[in-house]
Amino acid sequence: MSRPKVFLYALSTCPWCRKTKQLLTDTKVEFDFVDIDLLPDDEADAIADKAYEVSGARVFPIVVIGDDVVVGYDPDKLADLLKVGWGS
Amino acid sequence: MADTVPRKQALHYFWERIVDQIGYKFTPDEELVDFLLEQEVALEEKFEAPYCPCQRRTGVWAQDMQIICPCIPYHREHYDKMRRCWCGLFVHKDVTDPDALKQIPPDEV
């Protein structure tokens, strides 16, 4: 069974976004991400609108896993959706 | 590179007194405090206000003013439920283990 695509909307200034990146990296989950605040303004606005569209939130991190969305740093929810265990 | 220490110290001094009045304190996680203050000084330098490092400005002032640190009064119900603010710079006064606190999405409050 193939794993759903994982995409992280992040801000480079947000420590919880960094923790989410680290968590996904440590467990070898394939994912893409964008640090919205590092993009040119026009592009950043468009991506932030997209993040809001999928999550209804303007807080970060936002992780999209297939059809599911996780708002905030939530290792338990991520583990459940990705069917992985952390730190084992 | 600018020396950010004096501004970080100033923000710490003022914010400690402000949030104390509303039942909060700086998180005991000193490393997190230093990182977040560093980000906020940079955001203040760039955007003329210390916006929350974990929320993004919309360009609409009425919304953006609600994420200027300390933004607790604008999100009281949400933050009180988490016992911390969104970025974790501030926690309820009785919190001793900030790692035990979870971020709860705004729409789940």
Image: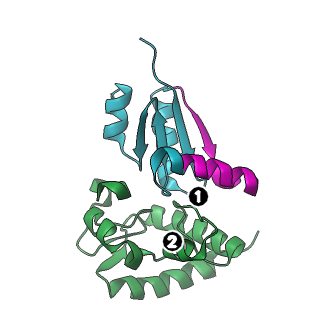
Chain colours: A cyan, B green
* Residue A87 visible in the shown view: no
Please report the residue visible at 59 percent of the width from the left and 68 percent of the height from the top: B38
Residue position marked by numbered label 1 in the rendering: A13
Amino acid at circle 1: Thr
**In the depicted view, which residue is nearer to us: B22 or B94?**
B22
Image location of residue A41, percent across then percent down:
74, 57
Numbered range of the magenta stretch: A30-51
Characterize the magenta stretch by its predominant secondary structure.
helix
Q: Is residue B53 magenta?
A: no
Callout 1: helix, strand or loop?
loop
Residue B67 image label? 2
Q: Nearer the viewer, mark 1 or mark 2?
A: 2
CA gap between label 1 and label 2 equals: 14 Å
Instruction: Output the chain of dot 2.
Output: B
Q: Is residue B88 left or right of residue A25?
A: left
Q: Quadrant of the C terminus of chain B?
A: bottom left
